[in-house]
Amino acid sequence: MIRKKIDAKGMELTERVVAINRVSKVVKGGKRFKFSVLVVVGDGDRYVGVGMGKAKEISEAVRKGIDKAGKSLVELKRIGNTIPHPVNGVFGAASVLLKPAVPGTGVIAGGVVRAIMELGGVKDVVAKVIGRTSNPINVAWATVQALEEMRTPDEILRLRGKKSPEAAAE
């Protein structure tokens, strides 16, 4: 699928740091520490992005993560406050199942998926990370992959070359 480039310049994006990982490199004089940060940004309505930042200081890594997340925004398809249909996203060992929920359910999801759904503006959804992975990076990319696969009913009808039920009744 061809991804449509979304410009984040005019948007008011909120960011959330989801995971911080300290990595070390053993050198002659000891260890050198760096930080790897996973950041989720979203406008709270339609667009959400995930980015990784790596640097010697956490603040610099967060800044880099926010920049990368702003460049990788994805449009989140919704019907009301929930998603249009159940969808499964896979990335590496992580598999994420997203299901629509009735109004008032709330976001029932674990850490990374919860952050992505809330910053994307979804109010009612049930999510489950399937498999034995505790890697938040793979879970985040699996969730983004699931969001890219999502289609609204109008898009599906248009892809099939059919008219919507309202247009057919006229």
Image (cartoon, helix red, strand yellow):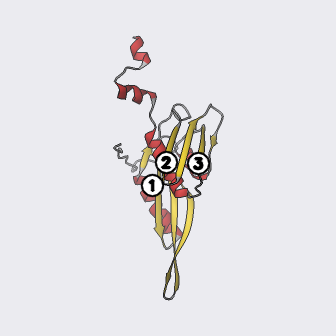
The residue that disc 2 covers is 90
Question: Circle 2 sits in a helix, a strand or a loop, which is it?
Answer: strand
At x 39% / y 14%, what residue is drawn? 168
Question: Circle 1 sits in a helix, a strand or a loop, which is it?
Answer: helix
Quadrant (top left/top right/bottom left/bottom right) for the N terminus = top left
Q: Is residue 4 left or right of residue 90?
A: left
Residue type, label 3: Val
Q: Position of residue 144 (x, y in %)?
A: 47, 47
Could you classify mark 3 by the number of other residues whose Cα lies within 10 Å: few (under 14), some (14-19), or many (20 or more)?
many
Mark 2 or mark 3: which comes first in sequence? Answer: 2
The residue that disc 3 covers is 129
At x 61% / y 52%, what residue is drawn? 111
At x 51% / y 42%, what residue is drawn? 88
Q: Position of residue 34 (x, y in %)?
A: 51, 73
Identify whether 20 is placed above or below 99: below
The residue that disc 1 covers is 69
